[in-house]
Image (spheres, helix red, strand yellow):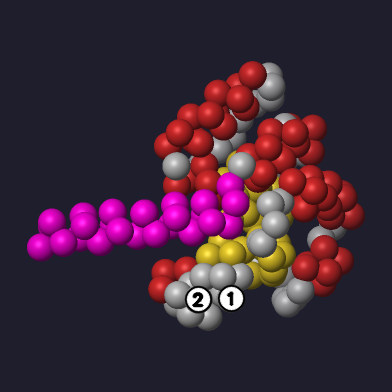
Amino acid sequence: MKYDVETVKEYLEALPDDRRKQIEKVRSVIKKNMPKGYEETFAYGMIGWVVPLKLYPQGYLRDPNTPLPYVSVANQKNHMAVYLMSIYGIPEMTKWFTEEYKKTGKKMDMGKSCVRFRKIEDLPLDLIGEAVSRMSVKDTIEMYDKYQSARKSRKAKKK
């Protein structure tokens, strides 16, 4: 859902009470488990944690004005979602995460990087926290650079 806001605080204040309380719980778990070096931001209509430009000046998609995303959380029309770039970019992490999620007994509704949920009870918060804690800023940069190099190689082979 789109909100005419520019900060995390404004975003939270704009949410309906029931959704705000749930997003705040997820945000709290993420902040508690976030490795040092990431910064909380508001971008793309979501609360996000990014690799700051001072640590990765080339930026996301080589845009020096856009920091490299790591985790985001958002309220959508029919659900809420946590976006975990680490489970999108690393097959071993995706496998670990999906196996651990199944062990929780909770129904998994997952896209490439997003974990969708309708209520907080549907989300394994401990697992979200563990997934967040697993990648340092350095790991995220290395993963992203590796992905970009592989992408360039695939494009070059197609030509």
Which contiguous range is marked in magenta? Answer: 135-159
Q: Which disc is residue 26 wearing?
A: none
Q: CA distance from mark 2 to mark 1?
A: 6 Å
* Callout 2–callout 1 Cβ contact below 8 Å: yes
Q: Is residue 136 above or below residue 13?
A: above
Q: Quadrant of the C terminus?
A: bottom left
Whole-percent x, y for residue 22 in the image: 82, 47
* Residue 19 on image: x %, y %: 81, 51
Location of residue 12 with respect to 130 vertically, above or below = below
Horizontal side, residue 142 vs residue 128: left or right:
left
The N terminus, quarter of image: bottom right
Which residue corresponds to the image point at 82% horizontal and 63% vertical from the top-left?
Answer: 12
What residue is disc 2 on? 57
Can the viewer see residue 119?
Answer: yes
- Residue 80 belongs to magenta span: no
Q: Say which amino acid is labelled 2.
A: Pro
What secondary structure is marked by label 1? loop
Depth check: 119 or 114 in front? 114
Q: Residue at x 16, y 61 (%)?
A: 156
